[in-house]
Image: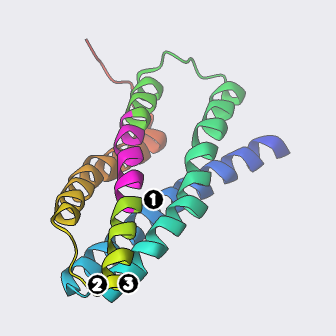
C-alpha cells in the first residue's frame, strides 16, 4: 500500500465519519432544542447548528467525492460497477436534501434570533420550516447508511 493510498483512505473514512457524526449530532440537538419550546434555547442551538454545518459538514461534503473518486482510480475499479454508480446517485440525492436543509437552518436561526431579541414567539413560518427540515433529514440519513454499506460490502447490484 502506498502512502498516498493510505492517506486518501484515511481522509475518506474520517470525512465520512465527520459527515455522519455531525449530521446525527446536529439533528439530535436541534430536535431536543425544539422540544423545549424555549426561544432562547432554540436560538442558541440554531446558531451552533448553522456553524457546525458550515465548519464541519461542508468540508466533509467536499472531501468525500474527491477522495472517493481518487480511491476508485487508484484501486482500478470500473466506474460502471453498480455499487459505485448507486453510491454516486445516492450522494447526489443526499446533497439535494442537505442543501435545502442548510437554507432552512439559516432561516430558522434568523427567525429564532429575531424572536429572542424582540421577546416574541416564533413565527408560524418557523414550524413549517422545521417540518421540512425534519422530513428532508430522513432520506439523507438513510442514504448515508446505505452508502456506508455499499462502501464496505461492494456488492454487485443488478439494476435494470
Q: Earlier in the sequence, mark 2 or mark 3?
A: 2
Distance between the Cα atoms at labels 3 and 1?
A: 33 Å
- SS label for mark 2: helix
Q: Quadrant of the C terminus?
A: top left
Quarter of image, res 36: bottom left
Q: Tell which tag, 3 or 1, sits nearer the viewer.
A: 3
Residue farthest along the right direction in this orientation? 3
Which quadrant: the N terminus? Answer: top right
User: Which residue bears the numbered disc 3?
Assistant: 117
Q: Is residue 158 left or right of residue 154?
A: left
> What residue is drawn where x is 40% and y is 52%?
103
Please tell me how crowded label 3 is: few (under 14), some (14-19), or many (20+) other residues with Cα within 10 Å.
Answer: few
Task: From the viewer's perspective, tell me whether residue 16 is left or right of residue 29.
Answer: right
On the image, numbered disc 2 is attached to which residue? 39
- Can you identify the residue that label 1 sits on? 20
Q: Position of residue 26 (x, y in %)?
A: 40, 69
Count of picture labels: 3
Q: Position of residue 65 (x, y in %)?
A: 58, 37
SS category of the residue bearing label 3:
helix
Q: Main structural element of the magenta stretch: helix, strand or loop? A: helix
Left or right placement of residue 31 versus residue 19 in this view: left
Among the 4 quarters of the image, the one containing residue 102:
bottom left
Q: Report the front residue among 24 and 117.
A: 117
Look at the image and say whether residue 133 sits in the magenta stretch. no
Q: Nearer the viewer, mark 1 or mark 2?
A: 2
- On screen, residue 18 above or below 62: below
Residue stretch in magenta: 93-105
Magenta highlight on residue 103: yes
Q: Earlier in the sequence, mark 3 or mark 1?
A: 1
Identify the residue at horizontal 38%, vertical 41% (top origin).
94
Q: Position of residue 147 (x, y in %)?
A: 41, 42
Distance from label 1 to label 2 (Cα)?
A: 27 Å
Amino acid at each position: 500500500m502506498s502512502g498516498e493510498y493510505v492517506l486518501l483512505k484515511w481522509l475518506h473514512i474520517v470525512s465520512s465519519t465527520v459527515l455522519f457524526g455531525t449530521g446525527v449530532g446536529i439533528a439530535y440537538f436541534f430536535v431536543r432544542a425544539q422540544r423545549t419550546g424555549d426561544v432562547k434555547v432554540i436560538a442558541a442551538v440554531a446558531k451552533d447548528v448553522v456553524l457546525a454545518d458550515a465548519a464541519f459538514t461542508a468540508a466533509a461534503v467536499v472531501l468525500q467525492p474527491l477522495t472517493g473518486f481518487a480511491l476508485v482510480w487508484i484501486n482500478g475499479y470500473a466506474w460502471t460497477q453498480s455499487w459505485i454508480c448507486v453510491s454516486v446517485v445516492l450522494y447526489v440525492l443526499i446533497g439535494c436534501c442537505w442543501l435545502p436543509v442548510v437554507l432552512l437552518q439559516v432561516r430558522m436561526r434568523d427567525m429564532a434570533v429575531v424572536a429572542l431579541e424582540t421577546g416574541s414567539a416564533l413565527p408560524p413560518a418557523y414550524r413549517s420550516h422545521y417540518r421540512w427540515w425534519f422530513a428532508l433529514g430522513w432520506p439523507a440519513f438513510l442514504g448515508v447508511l446505505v452508502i456506508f454499506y455499499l462502501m464496505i460490502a461492494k456488492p454487485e447490484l443488478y439494476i435494470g
